[in-house]
Amino acid sequence: MTDSAVYIHALGHYHPETVVDNAFFEELDIGSDSAWGEERTGIQARRSVLQKDDIRALRRGEKTLEQLRSEGRVMTIATMSEPAWALLRKRYPDLNPTAIDALICGTSIPDFDIPANASTIADRLGLSCLTFDANSACSSFVLNLHLGRNLIRSGAHRKIAIFNPERYSLRMDFTDRNSCILFGDGCSAAIISDQPKPGSLRVIDTIIVSDPSGHDLVKIPDSECFSQNGKAVQKFAISKTLETTHSILERNQLTAKDITWFTGHQANLRMVTSAAERLGFSDDQHLHNVEALGNQGAAGAPSVLSMHWDRFKSGDLIVLAVVGSGLTWGSALLQKI
């Protein structure tokens, strides 16, 4: 393996047009008023690939997801990826798509068991390269970055695209107020290589860890809806956000005072704010979007970076910490060049 650095040259993001605010859940009659969700999670709204009428039909049992798919009312992963890719290309206008030699997709809600969902994205975008999926639920972006970074450092690949399209609204039980208020849909896109292009984010380090004994705590069984052990997951999310952030800082001989920006997994605002405060990051250092977009799974943390892309200045150090089903957690240390 070489010691060459790897860089994120650009990020892009997309969130669907349907805005699902807390008042909508009051309308669905799930046992909560419009203030209930925000008081507990800090989430005010989220986005969905479904129209509100389709969510109402799912809630009332008038339609199934299979019916909505057959009617062409479900946005595909490939379709979601297009606007995220378009924004990335705008930020990286001299990108030569033929130079991309691998595309990784990390998603919790795939369109297909086979082929790899990455293949559908590549075909939609006109890319011809190795395509494969690598999923660790909400921690997939750091997993994909860790994997892509090491593929490039090994010399196996030179330029890799990473996509994290998430559509949790397709697998929500809209009668369960404890879960359906949390999630929103979104997609992120990234391009990485070993070329130090000005304006990129240098990937200084990545960490990814799993504890398979907790695999049953957060799950979406085949053809079923999302479920989790809320109390256990909340404790896990905070403790592992702290642990992985401390680990990557210590491994690189840094402290929180050296870091310019922090973002965590966008599970809920209360959780991620608590973790940021305990790590010693101020409100001004803490970047988040969960209050307006909900928990976007693997797309959450990278979409935060994408939404603040033009805010980063040369020399800024950024820490990203994520947690997910598996149980899996990880972090990335980045620096603007």
Image: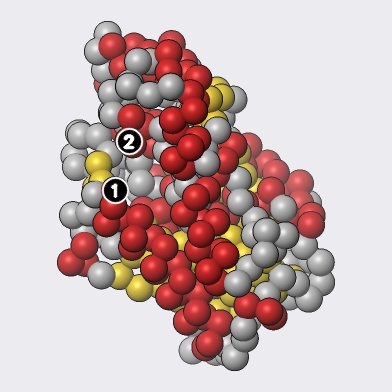
Q: Is residue 231 above or below residue 17?
A: below
Q: Which residue is mark 1?
A: 230
Point 27% across, 60% down: residue: 326
> Percent from the top left, x then y, of residue 267?
45, 49
Q: Residue furthest top?
A: 62
User: Could you tell me if residue 218 is visible in this image?
Assistant: no
Q: Which residue is mark 2?
A: 178
Point out the tag, 2 or 1, that comes first from the N-terminus.
2
| Residue 44, picture quadrant | top right
For the residue marked with disc 1, what is the amino acid?
Gly
User: Which of these two is toward me, 50 or 119?
Assistant: 50
SS at badge 1: helix
SS at badge 2: helix
User: Could you tell me if residue 112 is visible in this image?
Assistant: yes
Q: How is the image coloured?
A: secondary structure
Point 65% across, 56% down: residue: 287
For the residue marked with disc 2, what is the amino acid?
Asn
